[in-house]
Image (spheres, rainbow, N blue to C red):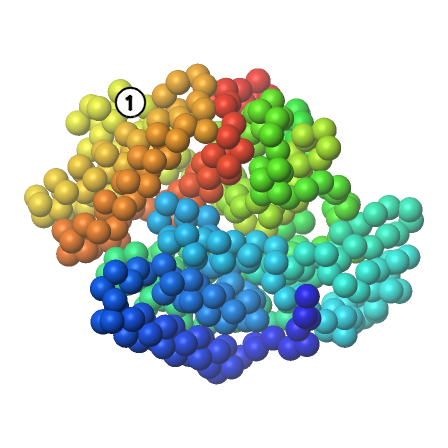
Amino acid sequence: MKTINKIPTNKIQRASKLMTTGVKVGGNYLKYYGKKLVNSETTKDELNESNAEDIYDGLKNLKGSALKVAQMLSMEKNIMPKAYVEKFSLAQFQVPPLSAPLVRKTFQKYFGDTPESLFDTFNAESVAAASIGQVHKATKDGKNLAVKIQYPGVAKSISSDLAMVKPVAMKMFNIKGKDSQKYFKEVEDKLLEETDYLLEVEQSKEITEACKNIPNLLFPKYYEELSGERIITMDWMTGEHLSEFTFTNTDKEKANKVGQTLWDFYMFQMHQLKRVHADPHPGNFLVDKDANLIAIDFGCVKTVPEEFYIPYFELAKPENINNPEVFLEKMYALEILKEEDSPEETKFFSELFFEMLSLFTKPFHNETFDFSDAEFFGKIAELSNKYSKDTELRKMNGNRGSKHFLYINRTFFGLYNLMNDLGAKVSINNYKNFV
């Protein structure tokens, strides 16, 4: 794959790149409407493919938060058109890497030395490149190591990148101006945390230690003496990415084993640690030859405050969802309903969230759940499609819910998608055995 010798780092350069992408997308729409005039049966499939291609091509060379947003959207299989999901999923681990001179320059800046001097061997060609950093293979003292290097300028460009995409995001998610800042601040803070590699090493060590008793779950060891604010060194872990495993695996027993481990890992973090790995995409997990799950990235960790955790999981119980008084109380506690809401808004959002929660919490209603259930995921797709076209919803203020919903919901949607890809049947409360 072609390497990159320079990444646009200042606001004007990055805005110019995004503007060029916008012009291409505008051209795609003109072509689509031109074809539509000639042939009324022309579908949006070709438009979506062209737009997804051009948007991804524009973002992949910017790296950073712009590409991270594409990676996040690739997990929204029930919301985004298929063309976008397929193209944006490349942001998980298939983007153009930094050139060898730029890698060397990064080491010189943060360690005052070359990678070839710090390690016994260092492969200048990266083995994986994603939105915020890329990974190189190295050896030292007989150990195989993975060295993650952050792209230059990523941390400094986060705020300006988000400011540029904010108008589009507000329109896409029906967010009005009032109170919108808290959601964007939550995303900005989390993205900034992901660029702090010293914090990532600390988080990795803490969660690794806390989850060490979960069977069939492995973690790399982290080497602080060879890590810094923009570089992390850890054990090289052998396995295939979770997406590769799900694509090739035909052994239901293995799928269930990996799925149970993944589910236990998340439930243990959520319920015991009240801190959770909030970036559940396939590029962050490997599966080894014995169907052990390997977690390799802890850049995005969300703390779950008690005042959010309690009402959130109380609404996972059918008896609370189906009790109008309790349900309404939790809606206010989670900031889904507001005191200033009109009677129409209260009725509309109560009914909307009742329908959503009755479906999304279904896995928690029994001791076991089969995530290969096509009917369950079909209903999620139907519900997403229904509300994406709801003209009534567009008239209302979409600023609903605590800021904590952003990453907690993202975690569960991502987890559900991974479990569905695996087709795993799991015991829901098995994590309690490792407390």
Q: Position of residue 125 (x, y in %)?
A: 77, 63
Q: Is residue 161 visible?
A: yes
The residue shown at (44%, 75%) is 21
Q: Label 1 belongs to which residue?
A: 318
Q: Establish if 64 lies above or below 336.
A: below
For label 1, count other residues whose C-alpha is less than 10 Å away and answer few (under 14), some (14-19) or many (20+). some
The answer to whether residue 408 is seen in the rendering is: no
Q: Nearer the viewer, residue 309 or 391?
A: 391
Quick one: 27 or 292, which is closer to the camera?
Answer: 27
Percent coordinates x, y for residue 34 in the rendering: 28, 74
Place of residue 360 in the rendered image (x, y in percent of width and height, measured from the top left): 34, 33
- Name the residue located 36 percent from the left edge and 65 percent from the top edge: 47
The C terminus sits in image quarter? top right
Q: Secondary structure at mark 1?
A: helix
> Can you name the residue that lies furthest to the front here?
39
Left or right position of 49 against 149: left
The residue type indicated by label 1 comes to Pro
Residue 309 at x, y percent in the picture: 39, 35
Quadrant in the picture for the N terminus? bottom right
Name the residue rendered at 68%, 31% in the picture: 292
Q: Choose top left, top right, bottom left or bottom right for residue 98.
A: bottom right
Q: How many marks?
A: 1
Q: Which quadrant would residue 166 be assigned to in this image? A: bottom left
